[in-house]
Image: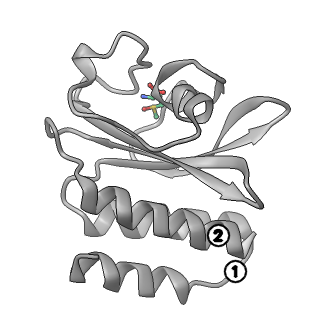
């Protein structure tokens, strides 16, 4: 893992508080520390829908997302991380802001079941790579372990 991401993961592992405080702390730390992370938020699965949880960035109208809908819903259906290099060429996409160019969505697995996901938008085209994937999957693993 990249050193800068390793350090952020260590900071995340030291966070304490209730679940929402920890999730919000992660959003704020990531948005504030990684230049290409412009919106960072959690969606949690409840009754078969994704519900917006803590986030940092511009307000979104997508408070609830169905499985299969948008990049967020597709990552749940596929049960794997999704990276969209250019959201303008993705048909099944829910626009949060017109400035967004690329997106990564990483599912959170607890006891082999998906319980939610982390969603990150970037204003940069093709902003996310395998380092982001590896880092954010480790963040999600930590989140699952602390819930
Ligand atoms: N772009 C996401 C919707 C969530 S907003 O970006 C916060 C999607 O296509 O599912």
- Quadrant containing the C terminus is bottom right
Q: Tell me: residue 14, above or below residue 144.
A: below
Location of residue 2 by image quarter: bottom left
Q: Residue 88's x, y, as percent?
A: 23, 16
> How far apart are the alpha carbons under marks 1 and 2?
6 Å
- Are circles 1 and 2 on residues that touch, CB within 8 Å? yes
Q: Tell me: residue 140, above or below residue 123.
A: below
Residue name at image x 74 percent, y 29 percent: 49
Q: In terms of depth relative to the viewer, which is nearer, 107 or 99?
A: 107
Q: Ligand 1: which quarter?
A: top left
**Label of residue 17 in the image:** 1
**Label of residue 128 in the image:** none
Q: Residue 22's x, y, as percent?
A: 61, 71
Secondary structure of residue under mark 1: loop
Q: Residue 108's x, y, as percent?
A: 61, 54
Secondary structure of residue under mark 2: helix
Q: Could you tell whether 19 is left or right of 35 in the image?
A: right
Residue name at image x 57 percent, y 27 percent: 73
Q: Name the residue tied to disc 2.
A: 21
Location of residue 98 by image quarter: top left
């Amino acid at each position: 893992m990249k050193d800068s991401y390793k350090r952020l993961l260590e900071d995340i592992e030291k966070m304490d508080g209730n679940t929402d405080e920890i999730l919000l702390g992660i959003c704020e730390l990531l948005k504030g520390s990684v230049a290409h992370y412009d919106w960072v938020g959690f969606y949690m699965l409840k009754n078969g829908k994704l519900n917006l949880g803590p986030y940092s960035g511009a307000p979104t109208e997508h408070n609830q997302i169905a499985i299969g809908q948008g990049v967020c819903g597709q990552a749940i259906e596929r049960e794997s991380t999704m990276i969209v290099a250019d959201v303008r060429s993705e048909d099944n996409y829910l626009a949060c802001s017109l400035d967004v160019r690329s997106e990564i969505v990483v599912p959170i697995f607890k006891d082999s079941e998906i319980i939610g996901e982390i969603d990150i938008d970037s204003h940069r085209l093709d902003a996310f790579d395998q380092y982001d994937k590896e880092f954010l999957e480790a963040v999600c693993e930590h989140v699952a372990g602390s819930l």
